[in-house]
Image (cartoon, helix red, strand yellow):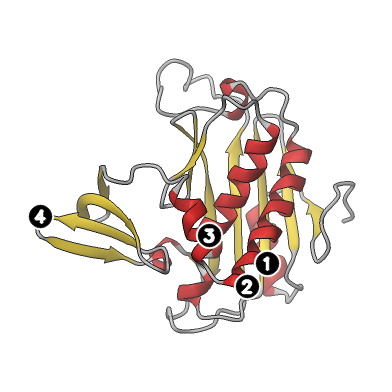
Amino acid sequence: MSTELAFPPLMWGEATRGDAFERAVQRAVAGCEAGLVTYRLDVHEMQAALVFAPEVPLQDAMMMLPLCGVGFQNALGALAPPEVAVHLDWDGGLRINGASCGRMRAIGPACAPETVPDWLVVGFVLPLLPGAQDTGITPDRTALYAEGCADVEPPLLVEAWARHTLNWITRWETDGPRALHAEWRGLAHGVGEPVTRPGQSGTFLGVDERFGMLLRDGDATQLIPLTTLLETTP
């Protein structure tokens, strides 16, 4: 369906009443062109997902996950009051004023890291209002409107996310990932702190050139590839 939202060149939008990620995956599998942004804007939650047609192996294409996260931070940072802090978890989590607030996701077909995937969908889920069960009980989890962002309009946030993300895609394609690395490092949450991943734990040292997590456990340093965060379709 058509949309009233304004998107930059090479992108266009499609509103959906269902899950925005499911819709984006359906359209990607059907062969739609890259640049489609599907979105659902509800009272309590918003979702937006962008379809990519990678020309690089999955291990490089997965850099679109932190790239879209940086695009989200830049977008919300431009719309929210200046005192609102927006940071990014390595695994796609979004943080507002230090508390967890939604997450980025990457979905694609199952394939080897060295294989170019047919498509990739990256986007975010963002709670707007806290659930009744969250109020006062889970201080480590929040919602957008509970953090001084009641004036941030979801349609404008989707538009801004698309613009900022396209800007970072252009920079990544033109100049490589160096600028993206620098921007992400300034926004990353938990670097230098102990973390636990499935079957692994240690101190989060930072990331390698493909944004793989570097985890120090004693004298050993482990690498957790970014491709482990990909949600795969059958």
The Cα atoms of the two marked residues, 2 and 1, are separated by 5 Å
Q: Are marks 4 and 1 in contact (CB under 8 Å)?
A: no
Residue at x 47% of width, y 22% of height: 134
* Dot 1 crowding, Cα within 10 Å, few <14, some 14–19, many 20+: few
Q: Secondary structure at mark 4?
A: loop
Q: Is residue 125 above or below residue 228?
A: above
Q: Amino acid at mark 1?
A: Thr
Residue under numbered circle 1: 170
In this rendering, the answer to whether 34 lies above or below 179 is below
- Kind of residue sitting beneath label 3: Leu
Mark nearer the N terminus (3 vs 4): 3
Closer to viewer: mark 3 or mark 4: 3
Label 1 to label 3: alpha-carbon separation: 11 Å
Q: Identify the element where label 1 is drawn.
A: helix
Whether the residues at callouts 4 and 2 have beta carbons within 8 Å, the answer is: no
Q: Amino acid at mark 2?
A: Glu
What residue is pinned by disc 2?
Answer: 173
Q: Name the residue beneath numbered marker 4.
A: 218
What kind of element bears circle 2?
A: helix
Secondary structure at numbered mark 3: helix
**Distance between the alpha carbons at the discs numbered 4 and 2:** 37 Å
Which residue appears at 64% of the width and 60% of the height?
Answer: 168
- In terms of sequence position, does the residue under pointer 2 or pointer 3 come before the other? 2
Could you give the CA–CA distance between mark 4 and mark 1, rounded to whole angstroms?
39 Å
Q: Are marks 2 and 3 in contact (CB under 8 Å)?
A: no
Foreground disc of the pair 4, 2:
2
Which quadrant, please, contains the N terminus? bottom right
The residue identified by callout 3 is 180
Tell me the CA gap for discs 3 and 4. 29 Å
Residue 109 horizontal/vertical position (percent): 53, 73
Q: Is residue 15 left or right of residue 24?
A: right
